[in-house]
Image (cartoon, rainbow, N blue to C red):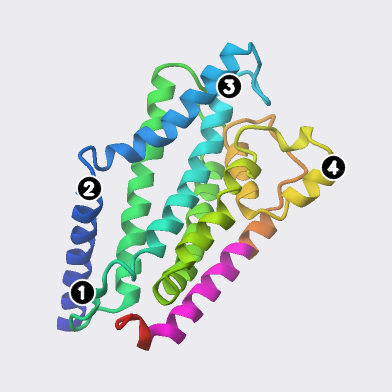
Amino acid sequence: MEALARRAQMSGALLLREAKTQSGRSRIGYLWALIEPLSHVAVMCVVYWAINRRAPVGPSVVLFFITGVLPFFLFHKVALQVGGAVRGSQKVLRMPFVSPLDMIVARAVLAGLTWVVVISILVVLLLAMEVMEPPVSPETAVLAALLTFALGLGVGLVNATAMSLWSSWVHIYGVLTRPLYIFSGIFFSVDRIPSNLQYWLSWNPVLHAVQWFRTGFRSDYSTPVLDRTYLISWVLASLLLGLSMLRAARPRLAYT
């Protein structure tokens, strides 16, 4: 019992440390997590309004964009924050009883809580402004968000080891994932592009996360491109690979 209490106390201390570190990086701190996705949605809405174009699917441009931006940023931010957990905590890792996995769990919990708050605030705000309708299936949207978080965690676990052992991986990962913003169906309807392009885009697991999240907000939104099993397979594979890499490289991580 004493060991468990000590572990819980240490986990709480790590979580508080990460919270202070994250909020202390800029003057606006966690407010940026709310501003960033909202600014992306606002810019695209202004563009569509300026060219007098309707939403790709459904009557609401705001609803379409917000249900694309939120799951994408959830995946992207979790993968980056978890990925930097080990590399940015070398001094802490030299302390007794602190392992790389402890730092990763603290980052993951903090990122998850942050995005629960961000998504909740944005949805409530847009509902209050009457620019979007309530989700028709909240449980579907929540499940999709949880799997998106798990995908970000799995990729983050892989990044945590890779970024610690190979400094160039930070830049390589950025180059590899930057196109995801364009190819994840955030700003266009996948069903309205040629079938050969649909096939290649369907290899992107984030695309399926976005499509799944959207089905929770509209009863008439369905897409043959969505493959739930494919996304779940990616989640399980990335978590397994990330944990395996972390275990194999653990003796080296505290000394990189």
Q: Is residue 60 left or right of residue 131?
A: right
Magenta stretch: helix, strand or loop mostly = helix
Q: Which numbered disc, 4 or 3, marks the residue that appears first in the sequence?
A: 3
Q: Which numbered disc, 3 or 1, marks the residue that appears first in the sequence?
A: 3
Question: Is label 4 in a helix, a strand or a loop?
Answer: helix
* Residue 54 position (above or below residue 203): above
Image position, residue 26 (x, y; %): 23, 43
Say the numbered circle drawn on residue 232.
Answer: none
Q: Which numbered disc, 2 or 1, marks the residue that appears first in the sequence?
A: 2
Q: Is residue 166 left or right of residue 54?
A: left
Image position, residue 99 (x, y; %): 29, 79
Q: CA distance from mark 1 to mark 4?
A: 51 Å
Q: Which residue is mark 4?
A: 195
Q: Nearer the viewer, mark 2 or mark 1?
A: 1
Residue drawn at x 30%, y 83% as measured from the top left: 255
Q: Is residue 115 magenta?
A: no
Circle 3 packing at 10 Å, graded few (<14), some (14-19), many (20+), is: many
Q: Which residue is mark 1?
A: 91
Q: Which numbered disc, 1 or 4, marks the residue that appears first in the sequence?
A: 1
Q: Which residue is mark 3?
A: 61
The magenta segment is 234-250
**As shown in the figure, which amino acid type bears the numbered disc 2?**
Ser
Which one is nearer the viewer's eye here, 212 or 192?
Answer: 192
Q: Which residue is mark 2?
A: 23
Which one is nearer the viewer's eye here, 248 or 50?
Answer: 50
